[in-house]
Image (spheres, rainbow, N blue to C red):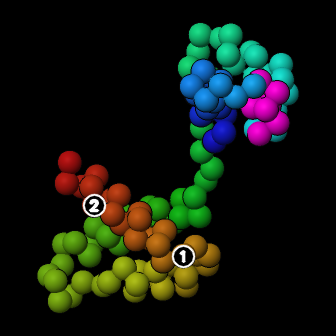
Amino acid sequence: MIDVVLPGIIRRWHLRGQVPLREIAKRLGISLYTVRRHLLSEITESAYAEHQSASAIDPYAFQLSSWLKTVTAKSRKQRRSLKQLHEELINWDFKGAYEKVAAFARQWLVGQTE
């Protein structure tokens, strides 16, 4: 994540804050050469892409989306709550937290309404 904002931080500290290059290198824990390279480059953002790691819910996404599809088709009183769906996933050896299930459900719902 630091690679994405690094050139902007270096420029801001050097040009606006008048922080010496050695101090910038010391604060960020990078070499003085790297600080100079970022200042001399025309690129304001790093070329590195953000690292996308696999989520704990990814192996269960298909099952959870099918459950959500059936839940939304039922009447309000017959629906299972997200806590119940989380407990079902735990029975399927899901190790993630309830918040992951809730975030997946929110994102799934946004995808369904579009």
In this view, 91 is above or below 53: below
Range shown magenta: 21-27
Q: Quadrant of residue 26?
A: top right
Check the image and name the residue furthest to the front. 18
Pick the front one: 86 or 44: 44
Q: Amino acid at mark 2?
A: Leu
**Residue 62 among those drawn in magenta:** no
Q: Residue drawn 33% across and 63% down? A: 106
Q: Is residue 46 left or right of residue 71?
A: right
Q: Residue drawn 55% across and 82% down? A: 90
- Give percent across and percent down for residue 29: 81, 38
How many other residues sit within 10 Å of disc 1, few (<14), some (14-19) or many (≥20)? few
How many other residues sit within 10 Å of disc 2, few (<14), some (14-19) or many (≥20)? some
Q: Which residue is mark 2?
A: 109
**Label 2: element kind:** helix
Q: Amino acid at mark 1?
A: Ala
Check the image and name the residue furthest to the left. 75
Q: Can residue 1 be seen in the rendering of this structure?
A: yes
Q: Is residue 87 left or right of residue 5?
A: left
Quarter of the picture containing the N terminus is: top right
Separation of residues labelled 2 and 1 (CA atoms): 19 Å
**Residue 22 among those drawn in magenta:** yes
- Give percent across and percent down for residue 28: 76, 38
- Give percent across and percent down for residue 57: 53, 64
In this view, 103 is above or below 112: below
In this view, 55 is above or below 29: below
Q: Residue drawn 59% across and 10% down? A: 42
Q: Is residue 2 left or right of residue 112?
A: right
Q: Which mark lies nearer to you, 2 or 1?
A: 1
Q: Which residue is mark 1?
A: 97
Pick the front one: 88 or 29: 29
